[in-house]
Amino acid sequence: MTRTSLTLALAAAAALAGCGKEDHNIVAGGPEPDETANASNGPVALPPSIVSSKIYRCADNKIVYVDWMSDNKSAHIRTDKGATPTPVTAAEAGQPMVGPTGYSLEGSTGGASAKIGVPGHPAQICKA
């Protein structure tokens, strides 16, 4: 039994001898952020959300998908259901919205129709 105790004590001493004396502080969040950098960023504005999504049928039987945004100055237009939306914007609420070449939109979220222009087609009245 003395021999086992002595062997265990020597093994524990050898294991502890390998440990260094340096300080191992681990900080989970990293360094503290600079308060002056955060203050200089200014207020952050969230992008507008979708208020209404409507499907319009135009006079030439073309289907157009419009997502009306909450800022009343922008919308997204798609000519195919799975297509990438094209943003259109206006300087102020209530004014006609324009986007890249050929895209335009006049109307409002609550309206039953809108005047929509897409590339290759003249702007025309489309009904929801």
Image: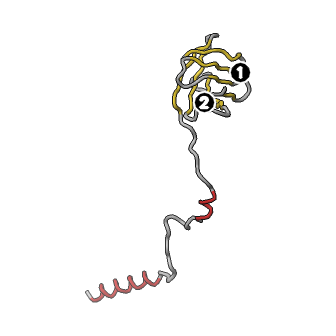
Q: Are marks 2 and 1 in contact (CB under 8 Å)?
A: no
Labels 2, 1: front one: 2
Residue 77 placement: quadrant: top right
Let me know if residue 84 appears in the view.
no
Q: Residues within 10 Å of mark 2 (few under 14, many from 20)?
A: many
Pointer 2: what residue?
75
Q: Nearer the viewer, residue 79 or 125?
A: 125
- Can you give x and y, in whole percent of width and height, for residue 71 in the image? 57, 35
- Can you give x and y, in whole percent of width and height, for residue 12 in the image? 38, 82
Let me know if residue 76 appears in the view.
yes
Task: Indicate the amino acid at tag 1.
Answer: Pro
**55 sits to left or right of 96:** left
- Can you give x and y, in whole percent of width and height, for residue 26 in the image? 49, 70
| Secondary element at image label 1 | loop
Rendered residue at 72%/18% (across/down)? 120
Q: Nearer the viewer, residue 124 or 93?
A: 93
Q: Quadrant of the C terminus?
A: top right
**101 sits to left or right of 110:** right
| Secondary element at image label 2 | strand
The tag earlier along the polypeptide, 2 or 1, is 2
The label shown at residue 119 is 1
Q: Quadrant of the N terminus?
A: bottom left
Task: Indicate the amino acid at tag 2.
Answer: Ala
Rendered residue at 61%/29% (across/down)? 76
Where is 107 relative to 25, above or below?
above
